[in-house]
Image (tube, rainbow, N blue to C red):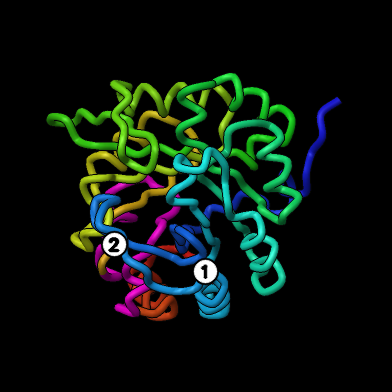
Amino acid sequence: MAVFHQCATKYPTMFKKRIIAKLDVKNEFVIKGIHLEGLRKVGDPIVLAKKYYEEGIDEIIFMDAVASLYNRNNLLHIIEDACKEVFIPITIGGGIRSINDIELALKAGADKIAINTQAIKTPELIKIASRVYGSQCIIGSIEAKNKSTNKWEAYVDNGRQPTSLDVIEWAKELEDLGVGEILITSIDKEGTKKGFHFELCEAISSAVSLPVIACGGAGNPTHMVEAFNNTNVEALAIASVLHYNLFSIPEIKTSLQNSEIIIRL
């Protein structure tokens, strides 16, 4: 008999665009780099999560940046503490390798689970997890690197290992396996603060009928307006622009609202 957690119904699908804070965590600190390399500490994950929540962020993604080194996710205690301060959907990713890992993450308080490496290694895990916990709980995470015009390769282990998988075909397969959302991270744009990879975002959102979260490249509100206006992505995951206090969440949302983009206020 399938077991459905509250994440399957707690947050109904909405048509409003979402802004999501992405916190990559290593050894108890939020870290940030460029192209997923040259990582530096930028703050305490609980302090930052609470700050972004109070400023009005729609969701938060906690990603274990070194899970492959430990063969497990090390964020469960952080999620437990965050849930005492933050009352919006929380996603956890990195090092999720089994149904038991998913169960532990949900019990810790996560609402959604993002899976990348293990989805490629064991696609059956996605099929089982989406059936047991509901598609709303399972996010297919893809790290994409540009190989040629309109051609991207999927990477794993936080952008360190190529897989030879075509990103667009893999996104379609993830949809068939049962994920409820796609998180697409452009390795080429990640950390650059030069804007989102529009071609990649549009290629993914055109290939699947799922909500697509674009990640990598946000440096200012204009980049976010352009991403929503030039692609069909449903949400944007941002990091540097928040971690380095370049713009506040109210400033970002005001800019989006002034550009007639429907958002959650």
Q: Which residue is drawn at 71% across and 35% down?
A: 100
Task: Judge whether residue 196 can be spotted in this image.
Answer: no
Residue located farthest toward the right when viewing the structure as drawn: 1
In the rendering, at what x and y percent does residue 157 appear?
Answer: 39, 38
Q: Specify whether residue 227 is painted magenta.
A: yes
In this rendering, the answer to whether 24 lies above or below 53 is: above
What residue is shown with label 1?
A: 45
In this rendering, the answer to whether 13 lies above or below 133 is: below
Q: What element carries label 2?
A: loop
Comparing labels 1 and 2, the label whose residue is closer to the camera: 1
In the rendering, at what x and y percent does residue 148 appear?
Answer: 13, 29
Task: Judge whether residue 170 can be spotted in this image.
Answer: yes
Judge from the rendering whether residue 76 lies leftward or rightward of residue 166; answer left or right.
right
> Would you say the residues marked 1 and 2 are in contact, meaning their CB atoms lie under 8 Å apart?
no
- Three-letter code for the amino acid on which mark 2 is drawn: Ala
The front one of 210 and 242 is 242
Residue 104 sits in which quadrant? top right
Q: Residue at x 59, y 55 (%)?
A: 75
In the rendering, at what x and y percent does residue 195 appear?
Answer: 22, 58
In this rendering, the answer to whether 184 lies above or below 89 is: above
The front one of 116 and 216 is 116
Q: How crowded is mark 2: few (under 14 residues within 10 Å), some or many (20 or more)?
A: many
Q: What stretch is highlighted in magenta?
A: 220-246
What residue is shown with label 2?
A: 218
Q: Specify whether residue 9 is painted magenta.
A: no
**Quarter of the figure that contains the N terminus:** top right
Residue located farthest toward the front when viewing the structure as drawn: 70
The front one of 7 and 117 is 117
Judge from the rendering whether residue 99 lies leftward or rightward of residue 159; answer left or right.
right
Judge from the rendering whether residue 40 lies leftward or rightward of residue 18; answer left or right.
left
Q: What element carries label 1?
A: helix
- Three-letter code for the amino acid on which mark 1 is drawn: Pro
